[in-house]
């Protein structure tokens, strides 16, 4: 557990996500969240993955956590726009 593990898992998840392997990405991001719940980017990637899997409620939940944790992040504007779309 810890930040290093979380970052490794996050990177693995991004590779799976980019390869359209959503199940693998989701597992990696969930494990990254367990390893370090304070890593904001994990919340963002969980949200995007859940959105891809049509799980709007979980996507909204993780976008909210991400914006709470990292309101100034480079992906914050995208997250806000996604949140608006998902709430429609």
Image (cartoon, rainbow, N blue to C red):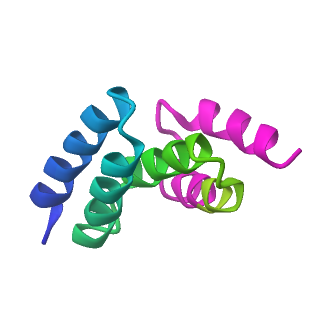
Q: Quadrant of the C terminus?
A: top right
Q: Nearer the viewer, residue 46 or 36?
A: 46
Main structural element of the magenta stretch: helix, strand or loop?
Answer: helix
Q: Nearer the viewer, residue 24 or 29?
A: 24
Q: Position of residue 30 (x, y in %)?
A: 35, 63
Q: Position of residue 46 (x, y in %)?
A: 46, 52
The residue positioned 53% from the left and 42% from the top of the image is 48
The answer to whether residue 13 is magenta is no
The residue most toward the right is: 88
Q: Quadrant of the N terminus?
A: bottom left
On screen, residue 84 versus residue 22, left or right, reads right
Q: Quadrant of residue 29?
A: bottom left
On screen, residue 31 versus residue 44, left or right, reads left
The answer to whether residue 79 is magenta is yes
Q: Position of residue 18 (x, y in %)?
A: 35, 27
Q: Quadrant of residue 52?
A: top right
On screen, residue 36 versus residue 87, left or right, reads left
Q: Position of residue 8 (x, y in %)?
A: 14, 48
Q: Nearer the viewer, residue 18 or 34?
A: 18
Q: Which residues are magenta?
A: 62-88
Q: Quadrant of residue 79?
A: top right
Q: Nearer the viewer, residue 83 or 18?
A: 18
């Amino acid at each position: 557990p810890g930040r290093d593990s979380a970052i490794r898992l996050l990177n693995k998840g991004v590779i799976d996500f980019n390869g359209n392997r959503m199940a693998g990405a989701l597992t990696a991001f969930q494990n990254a969240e367990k390893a370090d719940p304070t890593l904001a980017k994990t919340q963002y990637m969980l949200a995007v993955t859940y959105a891809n899997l049509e799980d709007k409620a979980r996507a909204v939940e993780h976008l909210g956590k991400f914006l709470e944790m990292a309101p100034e992040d480079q992906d914050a504007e995208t997250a806000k726009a996604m949140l608006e779309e998902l709430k429609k």
